[in-house]
Image (tube, rainbow, N blue to C red):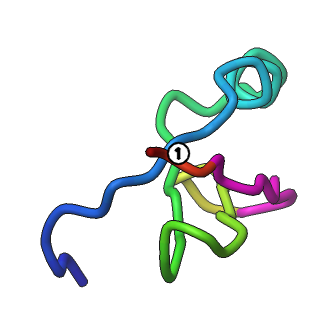
Amino acid sequence: MNQGALPIGFNGRYLLDFLGRIEAGRVKMIFKSSVTPCEITPLEEPISYRYIVMPMVIK
């Protein structure tokens, strides 16, 4: 469900670390707000792993 823009920031090193270790070409990011953990999984099935990353505060 797309509910509009959400200001959110992540440490780029954490995202690149995850993306560099997976074989999937696309990922899905699931989050509820800009201050709760984000779950990242491969977009393709079967989903055999998930990555949880905390967002950074943006001011």
Q: Amino acid at mark 1?
A: Val
Question: Relative to 24, does residue 28 appear above or below in the rendering?
Answer: below
Question: Relative to 52, does residue 24 appear above or below in the rendering?
Answer: above
Of 34 and 32, which appears nearest the observer? 34
Q: Position of residue 4 (x, y in %)?
A: 13, 71
- On the image, which quarter does residue 11 sit in? top right
Q: Position of residue 8 (x, y in %)?
A: 44, 52
- On the image, which quarter does residue 14 sit in? top right
**18 left or right of 16 in image:** right
Q: Check the image and name the residue furthest to the front.
A: 59
**12 left or right of 59 in image:** right
Q: Quadrant of the N terminus?
A: bottom left
Q: Position of residue 24 (x, y in %)?
A: 62, 33
Give the crowd class for mark 1: few <14, some 14-19, many >=20 residues within 10 Å.
few
What segment is highlighted magenta in the picture?
47-56
**Residue drawn at (54%, 53%) of the image:** 44
Q: Name the magenta segment's main secondary structure.
A: loop
Q: Is 54 inside the magenta-drawn segment? A: yes
Quickly name the residue at label 1: 27
**Residue drawn at (51%, 42%) of the image:** 9
**Residue drawn at (70%, 63%) of the image:** 46
Q: Quadrant of the C terminus?
A: top left
**27 left or right of 17 in image:** left
Q: Position of residue 49 (x, y in %)?
A: 86, 57
